[in-house]
Amino acid sequence: MKATAPRIEPLPATPDRRAAVEHRDAAADGRFVFAVRTTGIYCRPSCPSRRARPENVLFFACCADAERAGFRACRRCQPRRETCDAALVAAVADACRRLDAAAGEGRRLDLAELARVAGYGKAHFHRAFRQRTGLTPRGYAEAARYRRLRDALAAGAPVLGAIADAGFSSPSRAYAAAARQLGTTPAAFRDRVRADGIRYATRATTLGWVLVAATPGGVCALVLGDSRRALEDEFEARQPQARKAARDPRIAAWLRRVVDFVADPATPLQLPLDVAGTAFQHRVWNALLALPPGTTTSYGALAATLGAPRAVRAVAGACAANPAALVIPCHRVVAKDGGMAGYRWGVERKARLQERERAATAGAGGPGGKASQRAGR
């Protein structure tokens, strides 16, 4: 008698699986696949295809289970293609290190060389690099050169010398994308961060000390810490030409708004910003500015809103590079399982911020729900 194949049971349709599919969370790729009854097709969670009605969606642990249940692989997202190739991830990380080093030495690495060293085809490696960093290799190399240029100009180096040391072949190359990468020309950027260009002051809050630094254009840094001296020493080490300006009325007013926000974060902290970053970092920061107090999102969901669902690591890096805490609310981004993940200014401080925001917005009828007592009071 011929044995019948065992019936393949789908996975439970848990809220986290449904959310991963709804938000096209690339971080969930490899953990499960989802299938649609009406089409007979199964996909990876990050598939860009139009979403089916929830009652028509099934979840399976792997491609083989979905196929044994009678579904066929999506031709668009190709779920059978390896999504967690550790060797490829390591190759992209190595390429990033090579590009950083080349920028410092004034060398340029083309895609063909990077792909050859990695051991992959040019098209495949280019796609993988962009999926994992949010940038093409050329874009990453450009951003690396501008990071070196920005640091040198902020330290007071002469413009032409900073351009050469950053790895640009000529001043015209540095000026070509300066508006996009620096927000202005290299010379204007250097002038802006001179001694009379950046001023800062500190103040105590119920979450510790805060340092606000500003250029004539707005806030260029807002950092948190446990010690005023430590904050000032660290900031002056990074910006040696900055001046302390405890009596600057503009910075004093912004500090008062920060203190008020920490005590009652029911509404966003809106301050004029003048922050430097790459084009991709600014895209992430602008998306963060749209998050209202009392809400959170995952790195994967944030990447999906940018149209780059596989750039989860790059989004996390942009959050870590955020120069203006609280104003750019990276504390509202959590891990895919809802955990705190990391936070530049301390995970415990991040948890307290989220708790206070939920309580404050609940009291104001916001997204946090009903709260019996305002946190931290």
Image (cartoon, rainbow, N blue to C red):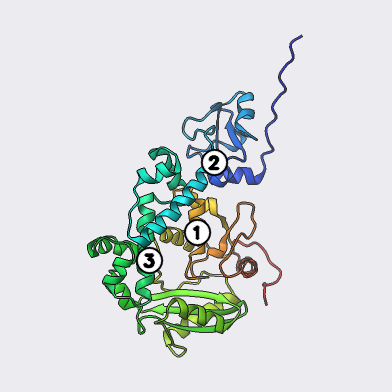
Q: Which picture quadrant has residue 145?
A: bottom left
Q: Which residue is mark 1?
A: 317
Residue found farthest to the top: 1
Judge by depth and name the residue closer to the eye, 89 or 265.
89
Judge by depth and name the residue closer to the eye, 361 or 261.
261
Amino acid at the residue labelled 2: Asp
Q: Position of residue 154 (x, y in %)?
A: 37, 75
Amino acid at the residue labelled 3: Arg
Disc nearer the start of the sequence (2/1) = 2
Task: Name the front one of labels 2 and 1.
Answer: 2
Q: Which residue is mark 3?
A: 148
Residue in the picture at 40% in, 69% down: 275
How far apart are the alpha carbons under marks 3 and 2? Answer: 31 Å
Q: Dot 3: within a 10 Å radius of its alpha carbon, few (fewer than 14), some, or many (20 or more) residues? A: some
Count of numbered labels shown in the rendering: 3
How far apart are the alpha carbons under marks 2 and 1? Answer: 21 Å
